[in-house]
Amino acid sequence: MFGKKKEEKKIGKIETIIGPDSEVKGTVFSKGSIRVDGIVDGGIVQADSVIIGETGIVNGDINAQTVVVAGRIEGNVNSAISIELLEDAELKGDIKTQQLSIHEGAFFQGNCTMVRKEVPEVKEKEEEVS
């Protein structure tokens, strides 16, 4: 089961909650963590963390640092760090992330692009000539 307490520990403090009886139309901008248990008809952008609960539905693109899905997404997901599709998750769209975890029972239809964490180039010391 997708428990709120377990995910809050993993993600941190959730600043915005869209409840199971709520529906949002349009793009949601959040620089913090957001949990969707209702419906979002539009995208979620600039978020730190996004959790889509078991009853949550997002019809639009998501752009966040981390994304955990137990509900449904129809749209592209761009995550700078990780995407986790839990057992009953359904994602129809393309994803781009560094880390991807798909639990048994999850459904994913789309393309996946894995990106490497950007590592700063190490310049070799130039030998001094005496």
Image: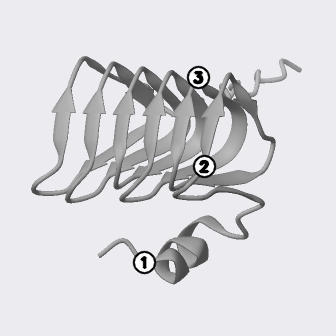
Which mark is drawn over residue 42? Answer: 3
- Residue 12 vs residue 62: left or right? right
Mark 1 secondary-structure assignment: loop
Where does label 2 land, which residue? 22
Relative height, residue 22 to residue 113 (above, below): below
Question: Mark 2 or mark 3: which is in front?
Answer: 2
- Residue 85 vs residue 109: left or right? right
User: Looking at the image, is mark 3 or mark 1 earlier in the sequence?
Assistant: 1
Q: Nearer the viewer, residue 2 or 115?
A: 2
Q: Residue furthest right?
A: 130
Q: Residue furthest bottom?
A: 5
- Residue 40 vs residue 124: left or right? left
Where does label 1 land, which residue? 3
Residue type highlighted by circle 2? Ser
Question: Mark 3 or mark 1: which is in front?
Answer: 3
Give coordinates of residue 20: x percent, y percent: 52, 58
Q: Residues within 10 Å of mark 2 (few under 14, many from 20)?
A: few
Residue type highlighted by circle 3? Gly
Quadrant holding the N terminus: bottom left
Residue drawn at x 58%, y 22% as measured from the top left = 42
- CA distance for labels 3 and 1: 25 Å
